[in-house]
Image: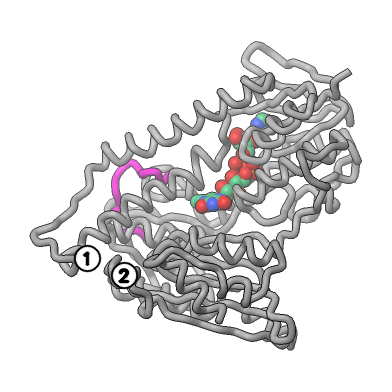
């Protein structure tokens, strides 16, 4: 008899778990209250990157005169931009539904909750439907955190989910929060033509990231005319006839046409009936999981943002796959390996693009760990000059005794793609010698990675 797996939430974690569990022979039901694809496809990751790509095209065109072009100018058609974002979302949604149904996954439109450890209820338009489950996977994601002083209205005071694109393109956007999401929004709207003020609660953007990387981004923001309110915390946001007024704790006031809150997220765990099944959550509401992503109730797993690990789509999907393999006591063509979150590559889609993986220089320094750091600027690369974009650098951290690659950061064009080379090297335990002796295509930006490994 097939094992009965019920998944609540159809984002990257739920989808991947559903397709893999079905492939492995389980009888899978996936309950999704909104749209299959989840926040990642509809509200966060994909639409933000689609708009950033448009902004990137404008910014590139504006620099294109140096490539021998003349009279180039780009403007924005907001309706066309909206259609573009929607068509990407629809395409991905359609592909996902096709994949799930082709694997025999039953998709139920409704809001899922536990009613005891082995019973899942889907509240649908036609009334509640009950499912007996031998394995339950909770993958309901997270939502934007709203501070008490802010009252988002989807019009002038926005959360990250109102911005793809917003009802009107902001003339002057005040962004509150300078983590990964905040800086991506600053980049997106400033490249699409909005004036932007960023409230930075610390002395630098991107707290926790390499200081050199944060400085490169700040320099680019300042060059584009972004105003930075450093060391300031927003205390209040008022809507006025003309726009918004954001008051900060150091007495400074930022005025704009719109405000956008990017101060983190909270897990969607509150109405899941977790107590009825005895599933433990931590003080912030994330489901407590072990290294196999099992909750305090062994047949109930949690994946994605809800698990309180790294909030990335890539991680969520991999967790979904790991759960399917673990819950069904199988693996697809390889031995079961636990996820090592320290080896996850991540990127910030700004200009310059920023990406890193593995050990960070600041952490190595804080731990008093001996490392070798090599850094090569893209300005030495023929391809960077051909691309008319020699900004940024590649940094590789390795063990001075063995040469094993421990970490890397890349700032510059295509950083998010290039970091994959270092990610593979770290995951495979390769040395700087292995990387520097690889024959890469010439001329490409990848050659700079080999140089940094020398
Ligand atoms: C602005 C922004 C940009 C981002 N960009 C990137 C990026 O570039 N790269 C990257 O890797 N990550 C990015 N992320 C993070 C990424 O979006 C999340 O980590 C990812 O969506 C988490 O996937 P998930 O499956 O856990 O949850 P989600 O994608 O949030 O999906 C959860 C699903 O569960 C459904 N749901 C919730 N409660 C219930 C219920 N009770 N019953 C039924 N269904 C329910 C929701 O409708 C949703 O469809 C970004 C996040 C933000 C905010």
In the displayed orientation, state which residue is furthest to the top.
Answer: 126
Residues drawn in magenta: 162-174
Q: Quadrant of residue 90?
A: top left
Label number found at residue 63:
1
Give the Cα separation between the discs numbered 1 and 2: 9 Å
Q: Is residue 413 visible?
A: yes
Q: Main secondary structure of the magenta part?
A: loop
Q: Is residue 333 above or below residue 146?
A: above
Tell whether 110 sits left or right of 156: right
Q: Quadrant of residue 20?
A: top right
In the image, 162 versus 25, the foreground residue is 25
SS for callout 2 = loop
- The coloring applied to the image is one colour
* Residue 154 drawn at (x, y percent): 42, 43
Mark 1, other Cα within 10 Å: few <14 / some 14–19 / many ≥20: some
Q: Quadrant of the C terminus?
A: bottom right
Q: Quadrant of ligand 1?
A: top right
| Nearer to me, 287 or 338 | 338
Q: Please report whichever mark, 1 or 2, sits nearer to the chain's N-terminal start.
A: 1
**What residue did someone put label 2 on?**
389
Q: What's the residue at 27%, 37% (across, down)?
A: 79
* Mark 1 and mark 2 residues within 8 Å of each other at the beta carbon: yes
Q: Is residue 165 magenta?
A: yes
Is 175 included in the stretch rendered in magenta? Answer: no
Q: Tell me the residue at 50%/71% (across/down).
A: 410
User: What residue lies at 49% left-to-right and 41% top-to-bottom?
Assistant: 43
Q: Position of residue 257 (x, y in %)?
A: 31, 55
């Amino acid at each position: 008899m097939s094992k009965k797996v019920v998944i609540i939430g159809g984002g990257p974690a739920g989808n991947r778990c559903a397709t893999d569990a079905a492939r492995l022979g389980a009888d899978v039901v996936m309950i999704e209250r909104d749209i299959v694809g989840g926040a990642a496809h509809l509200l966060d990751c994909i639409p933000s990157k689609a708009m950033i790509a448009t902004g990137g095209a404008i910014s590139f065109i504006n620099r294109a005169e140096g490539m021998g072009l003349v009279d180039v100018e780009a403007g924005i058609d907001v309706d066309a931009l909206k259609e573009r974002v929607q068509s990407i979302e629809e395409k991905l949604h359609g592909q996902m539904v096709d994949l799930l149904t082709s694997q025999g996954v039953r998709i139920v439109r409704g809001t899922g909750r536990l009613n005891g450890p082995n019973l899942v209820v889907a509240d649908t338009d036609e009334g509640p439907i009950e499912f007996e489950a031998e394995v339950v996977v909770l993958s309901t994601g997270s939502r934007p955190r709203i501070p008490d002083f802010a009252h988002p209205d989807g019009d002038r005071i926005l959360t990250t989910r109102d911005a793809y694109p917003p009802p009107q393109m902001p003339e002057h956007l005040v962004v509150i929060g300078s983590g990964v999401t905040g800086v991506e929004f600053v980049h997106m709207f400033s490249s699409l033509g909005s004036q932007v003020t960023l409230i930075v609660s610390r002395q630098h953007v991107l707290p926790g990231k390499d200081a050199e990387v944060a400085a490169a981004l700040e320099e680019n923001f300042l060059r584009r005319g972004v105003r930075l309110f450093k060391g300031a915390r927003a205390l209040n946001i008022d809507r006025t006839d003309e726009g918004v007024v954001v008051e900060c704790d150091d007495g400074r006031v930022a005025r704009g046409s719109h405000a956008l809150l990017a101060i983190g997220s909270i897990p969607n765990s509150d109405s899941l009936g977790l107590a009825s099944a005895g599933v433990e959550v931590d003080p912030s509401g994330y489901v407590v999981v072990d290294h196999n992503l099992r909750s305090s109730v062994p047949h109930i797993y949690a994946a994605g943002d809800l698990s309180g690990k790294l909030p990335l789509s890539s991680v969520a999907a991999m967790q979904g796959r790991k759960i399917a393999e673990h819950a069904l006591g199988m693996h697809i063509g390889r031995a079961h390996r636990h996820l090592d979150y320290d080896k996850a590559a991540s990127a910030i889609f700004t200009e310059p693009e920023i990406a890193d993986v593995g050990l960070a220089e600041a952490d190595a320094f804080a731990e008093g760990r001996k490392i070798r750091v090599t850094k090569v600027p893209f300005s030495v690369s023929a391809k960077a000059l051909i691309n008319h974009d020699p900004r940024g650098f590649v940094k590789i951290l390795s063990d001075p005794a063995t040469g094993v690659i421990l970490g890397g950061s890349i700032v510059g064009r295509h950083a998010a793609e290039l970091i994959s080379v270092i990610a593979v090297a770290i995951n495979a335990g390769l040395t700087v010698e292995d990387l520097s002796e690889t024959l890469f295509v010439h001329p490409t930006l990848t050659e700079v990675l080999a140089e940094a490994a020398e």
